[in-house]
Amino acid sequence: MATARFDADTDHTRFQDYWLDSAYDEMFEAEGVPRAHYRGLYDLLRDLPLTEMRRRKQAADTSFLHQGITFTVYGRDEGTERIFPHDLLPRIITSKEWGTIERGLIQRITALNLFLRDIYNEGRSLDDGVVPREIVYSCKHFRRQMREFTVPRNIYITVIGTDLIRLPDGRFVVLEDNLRVPSGVSYMLTSRQVMRRIFPELFRTAGVRPIDHYSEALLGTLRALGPEGRPDPNIVLLTPGVYNSAYFEHAFLARQMGIELVEGRDLAVHDNTVYMRTTAGLRRVDVIYRRVDDDFIDPLVFRPDSSLGVAGLFSAYRSGNVTLANALGTGVADDKALYAYVPRIIRYFLNEDPILDNVETYLCSDPVQRSHVLERLDKYVVKAVGESGGYGMLIGPSSTAAEREEFRRRIQDDPRNYIAQPTMQLSRAPCFLDGSVEPRHVDLRPYILFGDKPTIVPGGLTRVALRKGSLVVNSSQGGGSKDTWVLH
Amino acid sequence: MLSRVADSLYWMSRYMERAEHTARVMGVHWNLMLEHDAGSAAEARWRHVLAALGYKEEVRDDAFAAAQTYALDQMASAIASARENARQVREQISSEMWEELNRLFHESKRIAEPEFFGSRPQDVVTSVIRSSRLFQGITDTTMLHGEGWQFIQVGRSIERVQQTVRLLSAHFRAFYHPGADSMSVAEHMEWIGLLRSCSSFEAYCKVYTAEMRPERVAEFLLLNAEFPHSVRFGVERLRGSLESVHQATASRRAERLGKLAGRLTAALSYTPIEEIMSNLHEFSTSIRRLCGQIHGGIYQVYISYPIEAALEV
């Protein structure tokens, strides 16, 4: 921090490169004054010699490397496997803050689930004009094949990862819902295992709530969704295979839950029943935690060129002989244009005010909003509605004139496909970078499970934009992760 | 166990054995060429090597270049295929197994090139053979000896039996003169070469002394009950592993497979060597045909069986 107060204090040399600005700082409430729940970490950082910090960083990196915690980057050398970048310092959340997040997420997920049930059945919310029909029906993730079908326990979204950011005033708001096949939970779990070894002294005193029961909770959630009359369901995890970017996670979760990791070619459908092919013959499959996108799940119903799915699976699903989690067609509710309507959806279905707010969003399909956005492209973040992972985005303030022209053309060609949001000041948290502690922007993705009831393990994946000044936290775009501690 | 996993383990093991076998044959003949071949002899040798390695096309000119390219390609692609199969089932094999196979794969990209091989042939051959044996050792000490491990044994045994029989048959076709009472030094070295190609020279000497007689070489490589590279040893191992898989899966459709393996073992346990020698090629063809049927049977019973067949229980 370039202030007299910090510079004069030699105890604080670890923070000599730290500065505060208009963004919310997770660690400091004012210059040189750590927030109460960060006090332990602050003291430790001040006291530990640099060599010891480096040793711990090295130990953490080695541990990640040996566990083979990797992800795949697309579009470069056909899938390069990389170690997931990880920052040494935990992100800490108080019990009170977490309480709000938890209630807010449960409220939001409950409403979105009711909305999905409604649009695929009676469509009351559409009749009542809560959400314009065209937003729903023009969404490329809307699956007409799901209409008038009762999914087990009326649960459409079983595994959810919601992206939250913290605004300068300290409020958490929702940036994005991931209701299809959210990933990243394996990084949350493995990073905690590593951190316990790296910071034992902090764990002893801080009172960190455990998250290790996630796999068991997921298994219980999936079990609760088993088809009628199958009290001890055979649950499998369906992966697209070793070339998928999240394969590590698929293998990890399958092993943690003790269930079989299968590919499409391992499954076969006969008489509307799904079987997996084992050396001891066919074994019936009851619940599929599928990590394959809707489009690829069944070549007979969706993309006929898919070799990742299983022919006949959808028919077995509709017959109620097998449960898919998440259900198909859930992507309509995490469409970025629909996002703007989520507060109304919450009010309509639950008759409550949203606990967690949205980010202000402009829909390019609306002529007035579109011209507002087109006039101020350098101020906004423009996103393609169906994309994820930080692909297909324009970040106005850091864009070139050519990029803005490109997006202007794209928006005019296909307005329904774009939304714009003001550039958000993501909060910042301390990171240990090459010997000093510096602030970097972070978000937070908690994982919600919804079986017989919603469950959220206290924590999540804190993603961090490791490049100085960057606001993009996606791992494919130079982002990393931090362990997230929720305190008792 | 998932059928796909069994399939990958089986092929991983087969390909690894194939890479080692190719390296052995290549190394032996390279040395023989340096010591004994003059003039057109080398041409004949490499034609023979191509036949022994299962090369199907017609060799026009420069059999040496053709053999070298073919063998190095076969070795490199076998290693790459072994690794690819292992990659599909990384969760099922130990990380030590994966590391060794991955290391060999990256090394093979460098060393299985004609230029590199030409300058340091022995290093290449030794490296592949050593890695393959290390891999087997790691597999045996770090993996559960359950169904998956048994599929690995099945793959290795069936590949080794097939390769050994083919090599032996090609060798006899090229070098065997029934009734000849003496053997030139060069011929003598060829028979030693055959044994070396099967890692069997020292073991042969312990049983029969260093005196080379083609009938004894055949007897040793086909019928010896105690040597791991003999065909009989291989089929016993194959039958045992298939039996273990049968028990583990309790598959009712495995009976025919058991009978095939039984026939194969019986042929090697009870056929006198004189009878085999009276028509070695027919005998080796029948062994390879049975191996092919067993391979097909494994697929029918455990891997790509029709759904209807599996439902009729």
Image (cartoon, grey):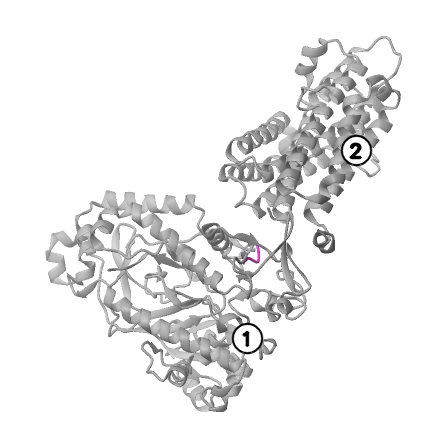
Q: Check if residue A407 falls in the magenta segment.
A: no
The disc labelled 2 sits on which kind of residue? Arg
Is residue B17 depicted above or below B194 in this figure?
A: below
The x and y percentages for residue B202 are 66, 15
Report crowding for label 2: few under 14, some 14 to 19, many 20 or more residues within 10 A (C-alpha): some
Q: In which quarter of the image is the N terminus of chain A?
A: bottom left
Chain of residue at mark 1: A
Q: Residue tagged by mark 1?
A: A150
- The quadrant where residue B181 appears: top right
Q: Is residue A11 left or right of residue A377?
A: left
Chain identifier of the residue bearing label 2 in the image:
B
Q: Which amino acid does label 1 sit on?
A: Thr
Q: Name the residue under label 2.
A: B288
Percent x, y of residue B298 = 71, 42
Question: Is residue A160 toward the left or the right of residue B122 in the image?
Answer: left
Q: Are marks 2 and 1 in contact (CB under 8 Å)?
A: no
Judging depth in this view, the residue of A160 and A399 nearest the camera is A160
Foreground tag (2 vs 1): 1
Q: Which residue is drawn at 42% across and 45% down?
A: A65
Secondary element type, mark 1: loop
Q: Can residue B158 be seen in this view?
A: yes
Whether A411 is drawn above or below B87: the answer is below
- The x and y percentages for residue B294 are 75, 38
Q: Seen in the image, is B112 located left or right of residue A119? A: right
Q: Specify the label residue A28 is tagged with.
A: none
Q: How crowded is mark 1: few (under 14 residues within 10 Å), some or many (20 or more)?
A: some
In the rendered structure, which segment of residues is drawn in magenta? A236-242
